Amino acid sequence: MTPISQAIAQTVSNPYLIQPATIVEKIREADDIATYRLQFVDEQVRRSYRFSAGQFNMVYLFGVGEVAISIVSDPDKPDSLDHTIRAVGRVTRAIAGLKIGDLLGIRGPFGQGWPLADIRGKDIVVVTGGLGCAPVVGAIEYIFQRRSDFGAVRILHGVKTPHDLLYHERFETWRQHPDTKVYLTSDRADKSWQYHVGVVTELFHEVRIDPARTAVLMCGPEIMMRLGAPILIDRGIPATSIYVSLERHMECGIGLCGHCQMGPFFLCKDGPVMRYDRVAWLLGSEGV
Amino acid sequence: MAESDQPGHREEAHTNRARPRLGVFRFASCDGCQLSILNLEDDLLALGQALDIAYFPEASSGMKPGPYDIVLVEGSITTPEDAARILALREQAATLITIGACATAGGIQALRNWADVESFKRAVYPSPQYIQSLGTSTPISAHVQVDFELWGCPIDKGQLLRVITDLLAGVRPRLFADSVCIECKRRGNVCVMVASGVPCLGPVTRTGCGAICPSMGRDCYGCFGPTEGARTGPGLPPNTASLANRFHQGLRLIPIEVVRRFRGINGAVESFKQESEAWERKT
Amino acid sequence: MVTASDRCGVLPHADFQRLLNVLTEKGYRVVGPVVRDGSVMWETVERTADLPIGWRDQQEPGRYRLEQSGDDRIFGVVHGPQSLKPFSFTPREALLTIERSKNSFASVPTLPKSEKVAILGARACDVAGLAMQDRIFLRDAYADPYYQARRNSMFVVAVNCTRALTTCFCASMGTGPGATSGFDLALTELETVFLIEAGSSEGNDILSALAIDPSSPAQIDEAEANISSCAMNQTRRLNTAELPGALYEAHEHSHWDDVAGRCLACANCTMVCPTCFCHTVEETPDLTGQRTEHARLWDSCFTQDHGYIHGKNIRPTIKDRYRMWLTHKLASWIDQFGASGCVGCGRCITWCPVGIDLTEELSALLKPSIRTQQKPGQV
């Protein structure tokens, strides 16, 4: 049948192929959360693999299946890939039992990451909640690798309880960069907690913002973005300067399986990072 | 589960330590689900290598005491003795899986739940006073915590094999709760309800059987139980009320026929039970 | 519609077998509608007599019946439950076999073997559905190689519709009842002859090999008239004027509760839809743990797992799922793929076990919501 584009037919590669990768390090983050540092078995793949901050991989466990996990490592060091995984579903619980030297599979990277080139030169406000901070970790590392290319950096991170604080060391390291402030808050606190108590949006008051030159990176629970973004817009930040990383069930990573739809968007392909003004109407909408 | 968490290292795991112990126990049932295990044939041999089949009277005379890593329970609870026995068995089971409609939902014998069991006893037995029987047939989950439920009358042997394979690999089994219709359409069947007007329960029945009945041109009678579990809630599947209305108004079933559709092998499951009782009030 | 050109010829009914023979000689397995289990299904066809001669279908919401037509038309049956979708996007497609090696594993693609298949009797709505599936599976960097392999081996023989079912509304969707593109050959069944039009160079080859008489202007006029009257006879229509916006705005409409009361969430509508593309991936390891198969299966937005996201379901209720389906099909689809996801074939109406009709549901959703009409305090 001729009507199909012959051009496409010649160039298709197989987007379903899975590349084996070894767990070279496993860092326990919490009872049910660990960061897995992976290295491709195939050296050529290791050399050629590139990703940008905010993209994700389909992580595969032999005989069990795949799960979409954002890449949390520094995009400048693509030979070691970090994925922070919470044991919550069928695949991730099985992955939790793995140890150093065990094998996973990788397909990716997929999706649109943070628009780091577009926000060069701006002040950066990062707003995150819980494990939702994972997709933005790579972006923060990228920014600090090029510290002079960006203005002030303000990192606002909220957790439910002190127990839920991940990447504690990273936050302490980030704090030491010039013109950088890290604000931590917990909805509930205990005696050990030396930071703010309350929800993350309360931290907005602590941050001085020059709206015209600020870009906001948000990720975490959808409700945090739905309630948080309008407050920032009230402070004068244009909706087009706010970026959110969204989450839906993903199976294929290439916009074909249909699961990751949010309104007209396939979050695996159009996202997971979306400009806030494009998705504001969908946030908090029941069943979307 | 006592075995390795690493699926890929399964073989090593099995040689390095004792094989997980399997027990198969029967309560009130017909043996059909246990027969499905025997019907695994070649795969049963592979299973016997991966597992220590410690207790399975239907298959072997060797009956070793617990504890067991995996216990498969066939049948429902209909006697005081069995009600006590299942409590003791739960203590011996690391993972307890019900196999079949009787164990999972009470089975066809749960029809007694709408009847007077004492009158049955008097009609059947010359000395009914010696018959110890409960007034009801209840699923295992009404007595003890159940880890996984396999539906069907009988179970699908492939599904059982997959569940055991997953458990051996340290993986939670994936059991679909979608409608039979999905499997039926994937198989390329013509819908018996739409094209032949027969009252098929497929739209509200859980997948897993491979849509056997519609593939043979007959209506599904719900032996895999309701979609998405026994619990019901407003606006959640299965929408038995809409299907029952269609049976009555579209396919011209009289209310007692609608009652019988829902009060079958899985008639005691909450959603099917509510539906049959609603239509019983209309008879 | 039918174009007067040298790519058009006439084949007498009595000679229909010649078309089957030529296709077979050119290496195609011919598949066509065959009567089975009270409907027609796509099956291999060797002789004209295998086709549903003398039958026609009556379709209405939730009901399908075949009946004797009283004539000897070959294509009196409009369609069965499946469009062309299962040929290119199969219900189950093995993607990879993955085998363990010493310290690694290797995934091997299981691309389908190409088998040339000629599908005889596709309707204009089916052809439109296939074009939409092409847009979905072949559109950009991630063109699907499995779909592509199957698609490239398909030869489509469309049959223009001259009889409308009560469930048909392709005219209002602009997809039929005549096929205008996307086919290799298109037939129009007239009283004693078939008008045959080629739509591709492969189609032209077949037409040449048939060595049939050219069509007369009168025959082309007759075909045009029959197709037009078929369009006029369609009683259903989908009101697309305000889409996609109107459905986005109807997100909180009271009518969703009404349709959710009837919907079974059984997914039949999505299984028969020519354009629905959702699928899930199934992993099937063997007992040795050394080898596993990675396959995709038709899935549906009506399943519990579809809206699953780390430990919860974002679409737990039937209302959520029906709203997802209809809003996607008729609204967000336009944003995603530049056209409606509905081709007007009416299958979701016929094959819904309780006869839910999307054209009526949309009409109700475009009317003011009962909830929004209420004044505060009113019950």
Image (tube, rainbow, N blue to C red):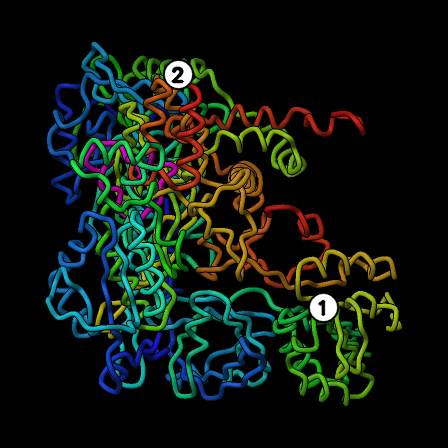
Check the image and report above or below for A140 versus B201.
below
Which residue sits at x=54%, y=81%?
A35
Q: Chain of mark 2?
A: C
Residue C239: quadrant of the picture:
top right
Check the image and report above or below for B43 versus C59.
below
Q: Which kind of residue does numbered mark 1 sit on?
A: Leu
**Residue corresponding to mark 2:** C230
Query: Depth-wise, is mark 2 or mark 1 nearer the camera?
Result: 1
How far across and how far down the image is residue B149, in percent? 35, 55
Mark 1, secondary structure of its residue: strand
| Magenta region, residue range | B201-223
Within-10-Å neighbours for mark 2: few <14, some 14–19, many 20+: many
Asked whether the beta carbons under mark 2 and mark 1 sit within 8 Å of each other, the answer is: no
How far across and how far down the image is residue A132, in percent? 63, 69
Check the image and report above or below for A254 versus B52.
above
Q: Is residue A96 left or right of residue C71?
A: right
Q: Residue A217 bears which disc, if any?
A: 1
The answer to whether dots 2 and 1 both sit on one chain is: no
Most common SS among magenta residues: loop
Q: Chain of mark 1?
A: A
Q: Is residue C272 left or right of residue C302?
A: left
Q: Which kind of residue does numbered mark 2 sit on?
A: Cys
Which residue sits at x=70%, y=63%?
A243
Looking at the picture, tell me which residue is in the foreground, A79 or A281: A281
